[in-house]
Amino acid sequence: MGLNFEDTLFYQIKICEKTFRTLFEHFYKDLNIGISAVESLALNIIKETPDCCQRDLARIMLKDRAGTGKLANLLQKKGLIKIELKNKNNRPVRILSITQKGEKIIKKTTDIREEINKKIKEKITASQMQNAKKTLQTLRKTIEATIKNKI
């Protein structure tokens, strides 16, 4: 008899991701500040990444550039970011930066993230988190090597 999909590590990773997404969306909906958890994540990445361009945002968020382009346009329309055309590595790129309105949203959402992290840390030690991170990195590298060897 084969392995039940719900017993696999892949399933546990996917269900954990979905649960996190649901948790954050719930909190952002309750805040009623007009942005989603994904939009908040993008704002934080833009703030933390010097000269953040759409390609940087896509790479960090693990999304395609078309999707992050739409996201950036939406954030700009809401007045949360500015988009400027500049040269980066001798190529024209859209550089994303946070507006004052975006900064205010980040301040409001930081408290939520810190509260969630605090609750998680009450149940999972720093050592357990570090071990889980190392295990997932090893798993990813093993899968990448397997893909590379197959191609």
Image: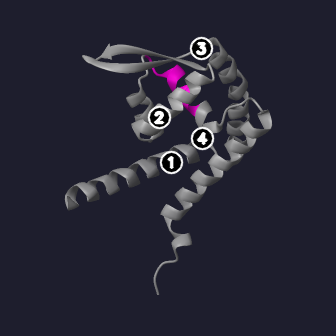
Q: Which residue is mark 3?
A: 99
Mark in front: 4 vs 3: 3
What residue occupies the far bottom of the structure in this picture?
1
In the drawing, does residue 94 fall left or right of residue 79?
left
Disc number placed over residue 126 in the picture, else none:
4
Residue at the image position 59 percent from the left and 23 percent from the top:
77
Mark 4 and mark 2: Cα distance apart in space: 32 Å
Disc number placed over residue 131 in the picture, else none:
1
Report the amino acid beneath label 3.
Thr
Instruction: Name the quadrant containing residue 59.
Output: top left
- In this orientation, which residue lies closer to the viewer: 63 or 129? 63
In the drawing, does residue 125 fall left or right of residue 4?
right
Mark 4 and mark 3: Cα distance apart in space: 34 Å
Residue at the image position 64 percent from the left and 12 percent from the top:
100
The mark nearer the N terminus, 4 or 2, is 2
Dominant SS type (magenta): helix
Q: Which residues are magenta?
A: 41-50
Q: Which residue is mark 2?
A: 68
Residue 139 percent location from the top left of the image: 40, 55
Q: Secondary structure at mark 2?
A: helix
Mark 1 and mark 2: Cα distance apart in space: 31 Å
Residue at the image position 48 percent from the left and 78 percent from the top:
3
In the drawing, does residue 92 fall left or right of residue 131?
left
The mark nearer the N terminus, 1 or 4, is 4
Report the amino acid beneath label 4.
Ala
Mark in front: 1 vs 2: 2
Residue at the image position 44 percent from the left and 41 percent from the top:
62
Disc 1 vs disc 4: Cβ atoms closer than 8 Å?
A: no
The mark nearer the N terminus, 4 or 3, is 3
